[in-house]
Amino acid sequence: MSFPSRAFVLLFFATLLLSCGGGDEDGAGVPDIQIEGGWARAMPLLGGDTTGNTNSAVYLRIRNTGSGADRLLGGQTPSAEVVEIHQSVVVDDVMRMRKLNGMEILPHDLVALEPGGVHLMLLGLTQPLSEGEEIELTLRFERSGEVVVPIPIRPVGGA
């Protein structure tokens, strides 16, 4: 192989290796999502309700140890018809909740979903949530995909 041909082959492979970029396609870093300390509020189906009108909430911490941001989009569980991200806000001295379309999880950050702040609402419970039991929750992230976590059920006070 002549010198110009070798130089072309080396340049081609060097360019190919650089374009791979270590698995980070957009240059924004790679998230590494970890879920910690999750729990849900115990909630019976009120009055034997089978219409899905009973709700509860899930609280947890999301840690991103990666170098790229991610976004929590929502979730699902067999224990409820819908899982939504909500934020508690005070409007005219009344605590209200508003639905969020997502929540940014920055690199090297810890985000707490907690009572009185951002949390996950379990809307339309399909079963009672009894203290000491556990439900399976699937969180959906924009970049990390689905993350399945066990969620223990605690009494309403969260103790």
Image (tube, helix red, strand yellow):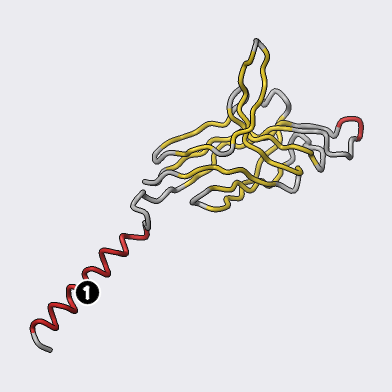
Foreground pick, 131 / 137:
137
Determine the image quadrant of residue 55. top right
Q: Position of residue 39 (x, y in %)?
A: 65, 35
Q: Position of residue 158 (x, y in %)?
A: 67, 26
Residue for point 83% across, 34% down: 53
Determine the image quadrant of residue 82. top right
Q: Is 37 positioned to the left or the right of 107 in the image?
A: right
What type is the residue that disc 1 sits on? Phe
Residue for point 66% across, 25% down: 97
Foreground pick, 60 / 117:
117
Foreground pick, 156 / 118:
118
Q: Is 67 positioned to the left or the right of 124 in the image?
A: left
Q: Residues within 10 Å of mark 1 (few under 14, many from 20)?
A: few
The N terminus - image quarter: bottom left
Q: Is 79 positioned to the left or the right of 64 in the image?
A: right
Query: In this figure, which residue is indicated by the disc labeled 1?
Result: 12
